[in-house]
Image (tube, rainbow, N blue to C red):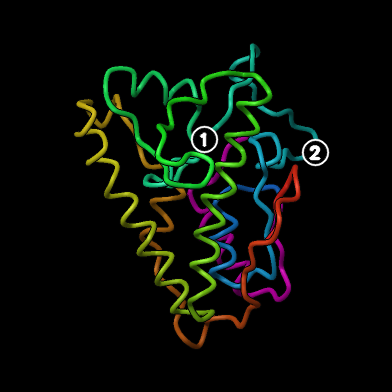
């Protein structure tokens, strides 16, 4: 399924202009939606429930073999395949994570299709984005929250070049910022008059296969 380049801006407009909207079965777009007026959102625990396939279309399967986890890389704010991470960090120190699950360990350790590894990666993912949701809740709904989210995304985009330089690869061979992340980092925030009044995002207990907040 092709994703329009205008999708991030269009989704923001929808969330800002229509009251009581919710966004489910998605990825970090859930946080962008919360910053722009969504009533609540849900991030899928794994890639199969982070996207909705339109009626009449089939999900794209790039690898029909064993399915490996997709890991949320905190500094880069992106979900990346576990095998790709293991290969990219094969000859250098991997990016690490300080969440309670990882406890400073490398993010290259999830390259196994077994159930225990998948569950550990999903727990890591949830703890990572929940920390961001909790931080978002400390900002007032509207322009303050949107500005925090934009600045966080912009800082993450800048880290891509630094991470590629650290591991000694070119931007073409290394990490590339996803188009939605670049859009969130550059799209203008709403004016005070346009800023919606929304409820505070909360980070409750995990509810697989989709975690709502």
Marking on residue 55: 2
Q: Residues within 10 Å of mark 2 (few under 14, many from 20)?
A: few
Indicate the position of residue 89 as horizontal and vertical percent values.
34, 23
Above or below 28: residue 122: above
Secondary element type, mark 2: loop
* First-in-chain label (1 vs 2): 2
Q: What residue appears at the point 54 percent right and 51 percent down from the top-left corner?
A: 28
Indicate the position of residue 87 as horizontal and vertical percent values.
38, 18
Marks 1 and 2, Cα distance to the nearest angstrom? 28 Å
What residue occupies the far right of the structure in this picture? 55
Q: What residue appears at the point 42 percent right and 21 percent down from the top-left corner?
A: 86
Above or below 49: residue 196: below
- Does the magenta-highlighted stretch encompass residue 19? yes
Q: What residue appears at the point 31 percent right and 56 percent down from the top-left corner?
A: 155
From which residue to which does the magenta span run? Answer: 1-24
Residue at mark 1:
71
Q: What residue appears at the point 69 percent right and 54 percent down from the top-left corner?
A: 42
- Does the magenta-highlighted stretch encompass residue 11? yes
Indicate the position of residue 68 as horizontal and vertical percent values.
59, 22
Above or below 179: residue 164: above
Quadrant position of the C terminus in the picture: bottom right
Question: Which picture quadrant has residue 168?
Answer: top left
Quadrant position of the N terminus in the picture: top right
Above or below 10: residue 157: above
Secondary element type, mark 1: strand
What residue occupies the far top of the structure in this picture? 65
Indicate the position of residue 208 as horizontal and vertical percent values.
75, 44
Q: 92 left or right of 140? A: left
């Amino acid at each position: 399924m092709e994703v329009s380049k205008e999708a991030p801006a269009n989704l923001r407009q929808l969330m800002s202009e229509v009251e009581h909207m919710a966004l489910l079965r998605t990825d970090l777009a859930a946080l962008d939606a919360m910053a722009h007026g969504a009533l609540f959102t849900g991030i899928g625990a794994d890639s199969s429930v982070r996207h909705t396939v339109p009626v009449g279309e089939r999900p794209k399967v790039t690898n029909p073999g064993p399915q490996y986890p997709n890991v949320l890389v905190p500094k880069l704010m992106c979900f990346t395949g576990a095998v790709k991470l293991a290969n990219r960090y094969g000859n250098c120190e991997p990016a690490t994570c300080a969440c309670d699950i990882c406890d400073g360990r490398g993010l290259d350790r999830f390259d196994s299709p077994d159930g225990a590894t998948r569950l550990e990666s999903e727990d890591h993912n949830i703890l990572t984005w929940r920390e961001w949701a909790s931080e978002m809740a400390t900002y007032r709904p509207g322009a303050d929250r949107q500005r925090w989210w934009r600045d966080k995304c912009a800082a993450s985009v800048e880290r891509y070049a630094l991470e590629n330089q650290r591991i000694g690869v070119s931007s073409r061979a290394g990490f590339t910022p996803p188009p939605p992340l670049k859009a969130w980092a550059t799209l203008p925030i709403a004016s005070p008059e346009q800023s919606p009044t929304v409820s505070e995002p909360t980070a409750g207990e995990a509810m697989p296969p989709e975690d709502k907040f």
